[in-house]
Image (cartoon, rainbow, N blue to C red):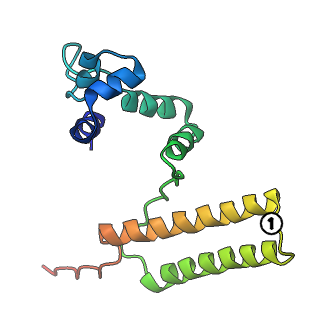
Amino acid sequence: MESHEVIREVLKKTSAKQIASDLQLSLSLIYKWAELPEGDTAGANNPLDRVGQLIRSTKDVRIAQWVAEQAGGFYIRNPENLPPNQSLVPLTNGIVQEFADMLATIAISSSDSVITKDEAKKIRARWEELKSVTEGFVHAAEEGTFSPAKPEVKK
């Protein structure tokens, strides 16, 4: 979905007037953000576009992390795309192993009934790795990576 489309959808449920007031901006600017940008005459470089530009310019995912935290979430980088026709069993086993590693990290960290800040960071890192690996698996499944190879047609 394009940024202007996201804003257009948001404006269906949130008052543009309220947004303009909260951000101390003109109502017309809020509506411009919801328009398809075409040259210099329509649309406006909306805040979503600017955040995307900032991330691409800095190549620093902490910006995305901060935005996700503002929404009560956590940013997870998408994994590299898996090549087609991967064997399903080893990849499934990989997710199970990542989950086991996550549980082991939690068990070790909580063995003394206290979790320190350093241990919490280790738990977070394992959790992020598990989510990333699982997201890669789900994405590959959605893309048909695990479908059987098509037989070659002999001529």
Which residue is disc 1 drawn over? Answer: 115
Q: Residue 38 is drawn in which quadrant?
A: top left
Q: Tell me if residue 33 can be seen.
A: no
* Mark 1 residue element: loop
Q: Residue at x 73, y 74 (%)?
A: 106
Q: Position of residue 133 (x, y in %)?
A: 53, 68
Q: Residue at x 42, y 27 (%)?
A: 50
Q: Tell me if residue 129 can be seen.
A: yes
Q: Quadrant of the N terminus?
A: top left
Q: Position of residue 111 (x, y in %)?
A: 83, 78
Relative to 90, does residue 110 appear above or below in the rendering?
A: above
Relative to 29, does residue 123 appear above or below in the rendering?
A: below
Q: Residue furthest bottom?
A: 89
Q: Residue furthest left?
A: 155
Return the residue nearer the eye: 72 or 97. 72
Left or right: residue 63 compared with residue 84: right
Relative to 20, does residue 133 appear above or below in the rendering?
A: below
Q: Amino acid at mark 1?
A: Ile
Left or right: residue 30 compared with residue 131: left
Relative to 95, does residue 61 appear above or below in the rendering?
A: above
Q: Residue 118 is drawn in which quadrant?
A: bottom right
Q: Residue 20 is drawn in which quadrant?
A: top left
Q: Quadrant of the C terminus?
A: bottom left
Q: Residue at x 22, y 17 (%)?
A: 39
Q: Position of residue 93 (x, y in %)?
A: 54, 84
Left or right: residue 17 compared with residue 131: left
Q: How many marks?
A: 1
